[in-house]
Amino acid sequence: MDWLTFLSAVIKALAWPSAVIIAVFVLKSSLGDLLRSLGSRLEKAKGAGIELTFGKAIDEVEETLPVVKVDEVSAPISPKKIEAVSELSQLPPAYIVSQAWLRLEQTIRDAVETPTTISPHTRRSSYRVMDALNLARSQELINSDELPAVEQLRALRNQAAHSVDPGITLTDALRYHDIANALIEQIEKRTRSRRDLPPA
């Protein structure tokens, strides 16, 4: 084999690896963006389906749970509400979501009448959330339309609490807060009306 044939064989052998190395250096930032994008999409993959982004999940809850009536939306916003929103906007969105869920969960725990077989000490504190939700449903403190929404709010709170970057905007956190407050009002109203009933 002469030296030209040898040189040609070496160039052929090094052509593809060299092209790949050059492409990596030239397209380094683009490849980084692509990998980050793929990573965020993979983080949203959940089982066989796709986990919705926080904002889209809130949209779904609002569609299935018309807790705010049209006349309430068109009503002028009170100064108290403006002040509350102003204070909330100073907080991290994930914190707003977590606190709204904790208030809703506590309202449910306080409202349900737990079976007498459970000791008074464990009735409020260590009672599982899903058990409390099922009791609230059976006691008609939460209706069948609201239960899936409450479960979705719970899942969103877990996403907010346990994700490194849950991707929650302030607007979506405030929407979550308003939904939780509307549910709390409904549960408290039903609890009051149940307590006002004469004993059977």
Image (cartoon, grey):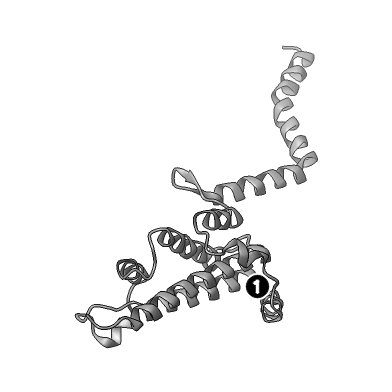
Q: Quadrant of residue 21?
A: top right
- Residue at x-position 61% and y-position 50%: 40
Direction from residue 174 to residue 2 in the image, left or right = right
Q: Which percent across, then down, holds residue 23? A: 76, 35
Q: Which image quadrant for residue 68?
A: bottom right
What SS does tag 1 mark?
loop
Q: Is residue 197 above or below residue 36?
A: below
Looking at the picture, does residue 11 appear above or below residue 110?
above
Number of numbered labels in the structure image: 1
In what quadrant of the picture does the C terminus appear?
bottom left
In front of the other: 11 or 17: 17
Residue 31 or residue 2, whichever sits in front: 31
Work out which residue is located at the far top of the displayed protein and give it. Answer: 1
Residues 55 and 178: in front is 178
From the viewer's perspective, tell me whether residue 143 is left or right of residue 17.
Answer: left
How far across and down, in percent of the image, does residue 62 sit? 55, 58
Q: Residue at x 58, y 55 (%)?
A: 59
Which residue is painted at 31% across and 69% down in the image? 131
Q: Is residue 30 left or right of residue 100?
A: right
Query: How many residues crowd mark 1 within 10 Å: few (<14), some (14–19), many (20+)?
Result: few
Residue with the most extreme left position: 117
Quarter holding the N terminus is: top right
Where in the figure is residue 169, as x and y percent of width and height?
Answer: 67, 63
Amino acid type at circle 1 is: Pro
The residue labelled by disc 1 is 92
From the viewer's side, name the closer residue of 150 and 126.
Answer: 150
